Image (tube, grey):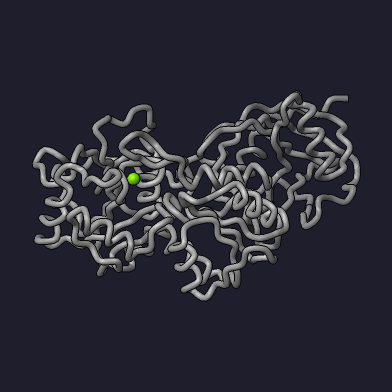
Amino acid sequence: MLTDSFDAFLFDLDGVLYVGEKPTRGAVEALERLRSGDHELGFLTNDPRPSRQQAAEHLDRLGFSITPGEIVTAGFATARYLEEEGYESAYVVGSRSLKKEIEHRGVRLVTDRDPSAVVIGCSEETAYEDIRRASLLVQDGASFLATNVDASFPMPEGRWPGTGAIVEAVRLASGQEPVIVGKPEPLMFELAAESLGSPERIAVVGDNIETDILGAHRAGFAGILLSDKPVEDLLPGDPRRPDARIERLSDLFDEGCLLSTRETPVSEWPGRAAPGVGAVVLDGSGRVLLHRRRVEEAWAPPSGRLEPGESIEEAVVRELDEETGLDVDRLDFVGVMSDPSYQVVTYPSGERVQFITSLFLVRSSGKLQGSEEGLEWGWFDPKSLPSPLTAYARPWIEEALGSTRAPGP
Ligand SMILES: [Mg+2]
């Protein structure tokens, strides 16, 4: 049974312990049974509305006995994040409890003047005016924090709009990407694990593969899915793939419910794929052009996205012109690079995109004409490339140079 495989369980709340005002079938008894054994328990919710005290009181009304200190809410995690990152003031869209939680960490709440951060939570009272103000403050330079990005949450009559729906409104209006604090980012799992002793084997039990299971795997824990439907269409290495599926919490004690053997999870699994272009640029002496954003960051060949309406040739020439100002003497198509082991790029927002890159070999005799601010450029002998290199640099260069024929007349 699954209880034999773990020393501690972290439970998601909504959809796992309850739906609305009703506990899920057998949940109260299953937790009591786990507590009477040797298992340590922790609780996690992406709901940023209640304080930990309020969440514990809600659980108490449903028949659970769980203390506030055992619960990590997205609001609590956001408040800790603001404190640890040194934010001094925040404009908060969300419940009174979320605001209190943040204030309690020494962050000043402001409504009009330049806050250092805008925090998006969720409350039944959120109005257009809150979203308008948040969008304007983010455009004016405040950091944009999302307590979570859950699009909706389950209620007995259907799904209600969640924090993610409000985050999306601010994102679309401001054109800025948020930093996400809640699941599936690891912070909440780390905070929940802090409240445990030091168990070796931790499993997260959740009802959502995109937040609970993916987040568990990113944090290094196992993920057990509570669902009456099987998970389909996920590849073996996909970190959203649960290690086990149960239909009710009492199944944790079922002799027939066991862990699936899982491939090593790929923590950099992409959320989507996108078309891109790349260039291995050679000068007259056969040296390769590479750039890096900052000292100590990885060196990379020039690359970019394909914009709608462009051909791949137009895209690579445009990217080279924007980034380097170099003249293109000759452009040869090398091939399409798609291997996810080096084609996945992680953005500061945490978004992971797998680029399907049309790669070109470019010969240029021109001079670098300045470049995008902050970029450092260099020409390198392909036999002694600098380090560190981005994951895709070497495969691209090998593919491009391997495909080289002697330059034409
Ligand atoms: Mg849930």
Residue 271 x, y percent position in the rendering: 51, 38
Point out the residue furthest to the bottom here: 106
Q: Is residue 178 left or right of residue 217?
A: right
Where residue 300 sits: x, y (%)?
Answer: 68, 47
Q: Between residues 388 and 214, which one lies in front from this camera angle?
A: 214
Q: Quadrant of ligand 1?
A: top left
* Residue 227 placement: quadrant: top left
Residue 207 picture quarter:
top left
Q: How many tags in the picture?
A: 0
Observer-nearest residue: 296 or 383? 296
Q: Is residue 279 visible?
A: yes
Left or right of residue 262, residue 167 in this image: right
Name which residue lies at 69% across and 28% down. 334
Residue 24 drawn above or below residue 404:
below
Q: Is residue 165 above or below residue 189?
A: above
Quarter of the C terminus within the rendering: top right
Residue located 46% across and 44% down the image: 162
Q: Does residue 335 sit above or below 370 in this rendering?
A: above
Seen in the image, is 36 located left or right of residue 114? left
Residue visible at 42% across and 44% down in the picture: 266
Residue at 89% across, 40% down: 365
The quadrant of the image that shows the N terminus is top left
Q: Is residue 80 visible?
A: no
Q: Is residue 354 above or below residue 149?
A: above
Side (left or right) of 221 relative to 174: left
Q: Nearer the viewer, residue 230 or 115?
A: 115
* Residue 383 position in % (x across, y down): 68, 47
Q: Position of residue 280 (x, y in %)?
A: 73, 38
